Structures are given as C-alpha cells and as structure tokens.
Image (cartoon, rainbow, N blue to C red):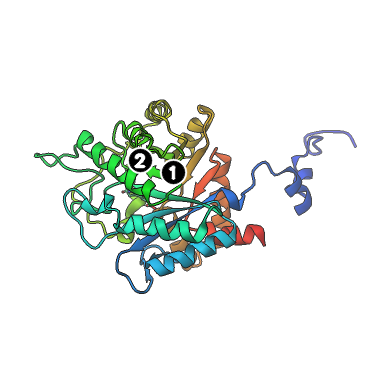
C-alpha cells in the first residue's frame, strides 16, 4: 500500500487499539501511596456529621476519626491531613496551640492508630480557630497582621509536633511562615518533623464548601494574603522563598484550575511537589454526577491523572481512600 493523503503511514492509533497496549505505554499512573486524605474532626461530636456541600465527606468525632485513619491505612494511601473544628473560637485562635486542643488530640489519635503506616499531617493555620475566620490575627485596623501571626504559627508548630505529627502543612500564606516554623520546630528539638509548604495558594472560589466543613464564617476575603488567580510568575517567587526557608515539599492549591502553575513549579524545583484537589473540585464533579451529567468514576480518575501529569507527585484529594481501594483491588 502506498502512502497518500487517504492512507497515512504514521498511525498513532496503533498504540490505542487494546487496553493492554494503552496500559503498556501509559506515561502517567496513579499510586495509592501518593494520595493523601484530608480529614475533619470536630470537638465534642458524638457521631460523624455529613458536610452538605461535600458529598461523602464528614466531620468526624475523635472515635470515628480513628476508624477513618485505620481504613485509610488499610486502603494503602500515603497520608492523612488533619483539620480540626474547636468548640470555642476567638480573635487569636487560642485553641490552636493548646496541648489539649482538638487538633492536637486528633493528631494523637491518628498517630496512635496509624503508627508509621502512613504519614500524619496537620493543617497549620488559624482560620479554623478564629472567630473572624481569617488565617491570622488582626491588627487594630482589622488587617491580617503578618508578623504577629507568625508567632502564633510557631506556637502551633511546636504544639502539633509535641502531639506527634509527622508533617505540618502551613496553609496561611503569611510571608516567612516556613522559616519561622522550621526555626520553632528545630528550636524545640523536632528536627525530623517536615514541612509541606502551601507555596502557591490562590484566593479561590473553589474553597467554598470547605467553609462548611470547618464552620468558618469569614469576614471579608483572603485576597491580601492568598495569591491572585491572575498570577503565575508570582508562584515562582513564592517557590524560591519557600525553598530558601526550608520547605521539604511544596504545594499548589487548588489543583485543576492551576495545572499550568503546577507544571511550572514542578519544572523548577528539586523537592517533591504536591497538589491539593480542593472542596469545590469535589463538589463540581459530585454535583454533576448526581444529575447524571457525567460519569463520576471516570471523571475522578481523569482529574487525578491530569494533576499527576501536570507534575504533582503527591495529591491531596477527598477521594483518596476510595481511589486507593480501586487501585489496589
Ligand atoms: C485554610 C485552608 C483552606 C483550605 C485548606 N486550608 C480554606 C481557605 O484557605 O479558604 C481549603 C481546602 C478545600 O477547599 O478543600 N486553613
């Protein structure tokens, strides 16, 4: 057969003809051990409580958290990221660094249950703990006070490490947060506790459902500290700073709307890169699937594969345990 416009010689379809050949040449694969499950725990809750805008996700009691950590470890995932909702919120988030605070107790339970079977991580931010809902403390004019917030983060880091956490995740986007946390941890002897830095965290509409999960009523918005969705070069600058300050891993968040940023970050650093598939990304897929508008399981796989393809080694996703079970089945 001679080649002409109707009979091409190059035929990329040859490598798509069977599942076997597609699998053989797949460039990107998901691994259960790279997935991290975010978990919410609420103080004094007796039974898990569903979160309306996050189908399949609940606020845990300490007891049900323990069970969820066990199931996550059995599913073979790589880690859990803990968020806690305290009973009492105030201007400085005073519950955040108490040894008996709900997040520290949750860390204790998770570490006791999982041991070294997975990496126990905790959110290091004030928004769950403040009555105004901001990620830091406010100055007299009501602005988020960067340096006063750093002092709170340092205290939180030591409290979380004392409770046994393996890795802390500073998510507040304060300048200098990684350096101050590293210094606080090292100063208290926790040189082995690592830092998953939220390097490029954008002021995103896709965090909407999360506010339900942590019962945060935010006054104003976070645009004076989280990044403008318009910016990508700024992520490179944040990356440079976080690496210089001692970040062990760097993260981009949200994931799907920022795959270009993820690729840029992955190309420019030599530490592991993580991405956070946030609450609104879950809600979008779940809501459309509930209406029969898209194939839920395929959509979930496709989103995670694209995040990995864009350069994330580690993926935080609310579907972690479910997907891990399928991957290892
Ligand atoms: C802040 C924090 C937020 C999320 C994770 N950490 C909320 C915010 O920055 O507004 C969002 C996670 C999600 O939407 O799934 N501590």
Residue 121 versus residue 65 in the image, above or below: above
Kindly identify the residue that appears in the image at 81 percent across and 33 percent down.
4
Outermost residue to the left = 140
Is the N terminus in the top left, top right, bottom left or bottom right quadrant?
top right
Q: Nearer the viewer, residue 79 or 35?
A: 79
Residue 147 place in picture, x, y as percent: 22, 33
Q: Is residue 123 left or right of residue 276?
A: left
- Residue under numbered circle 2: 202
Give neighbour class at mark 1: few <14, some 14-19, many 20+ (Cα, 10 Å): some
Outermost residue to the right = 1
Give neighbour class at mark 2: few <14, some 14-19, many 20+ (Cα, 10 Å): many
Kindly identify the residue that appears in the image at 16 percent across and 50 percent down.
91
Q: Nearer the viewer, residue 301 or 93?
A: 93
Outermost residue to the bottom = 47
Kindly identify the residue that appears in the image at 52 percent across and 63 percent down.
70
Image marks 1 and 2: residues in contact by CB distance under 8 Å: yes
Q: Is mark 2 within 8 Å of ligand 1?
A: no
Kindly identify the residue that appears in the image at 55 percent across and 62 percent down.
322
Q: Is mark 1 within 8 Å of ligand 1?
A: no
State which quadrant residue 211 falls in.
Answer: bottom left
- Residue under numbered circle 1: 257
| Mark 1 element type | helix
């Amino acid at each position: 057969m001679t080649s002409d416009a109707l009979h091409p010689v190059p035929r990329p379809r040859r490598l798509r003809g069977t599942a076997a050949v597609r699998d053989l040449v797949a460039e990107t694969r998901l691994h259960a051990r790279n997935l991290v499950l975010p978990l919410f725990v609420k103080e004094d809750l007796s039974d898990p409580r569903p979160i309306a805008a996050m189908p399949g996700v609940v606020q845990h009691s300490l007891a049900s958290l323990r069970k969820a950590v066990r199931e996550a470890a059995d599913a073979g995932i790589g880690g859990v990221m803990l968020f806690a909702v305290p009973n009492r919120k105030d201007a400085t988030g005073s519950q955040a660094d108490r040894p008996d605070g709900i997040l520290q107790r949750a860390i204790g339970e998770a570490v006791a249950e999982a041991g070294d079977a997975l990496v126990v991580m905790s959110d290091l931010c004030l928004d769950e703990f403040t009555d105004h809902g901001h990620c830091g403390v406010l100055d007299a004019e009501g602005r988020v006070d960067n340096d006063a917030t750093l002092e709170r983060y340092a205290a939180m880091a030591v409290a979380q490490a004392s409770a046994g956490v393996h890795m802390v995740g500073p998510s507040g986007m304060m300048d200098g947060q990684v350096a101050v946390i590293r210094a606080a941890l090292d100063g208290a002897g926790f040189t082995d506790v690592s830092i998953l830095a939220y390097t490029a965290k954008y002021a995103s509409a896709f965090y909407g459902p999360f506010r339900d999960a942590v019962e945060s009523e935010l006054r104003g918005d976070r645009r004076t500290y989280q990044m403008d969705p318009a910016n990508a070069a700024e992520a490179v600058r944040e990356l440079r700073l976080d690496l210089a300050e001692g970040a062990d891993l760097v993260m981009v968040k949200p994931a799907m709307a920022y795959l270009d940023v993820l690729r840029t970050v992955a190309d420019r650093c030599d530490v592991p890169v993580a991405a956070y598939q946030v609450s609104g990304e879950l809600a979008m897929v779940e809501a459309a699937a509930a209406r029969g508008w898209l194939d839920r399981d395929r959509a979930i796989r496709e989103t995670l594969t694209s995040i990995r393809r864009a350069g994330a080694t580690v993926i935080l996703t609310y579907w972690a345990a479910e997907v891990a079970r399928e991957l290892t089945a």
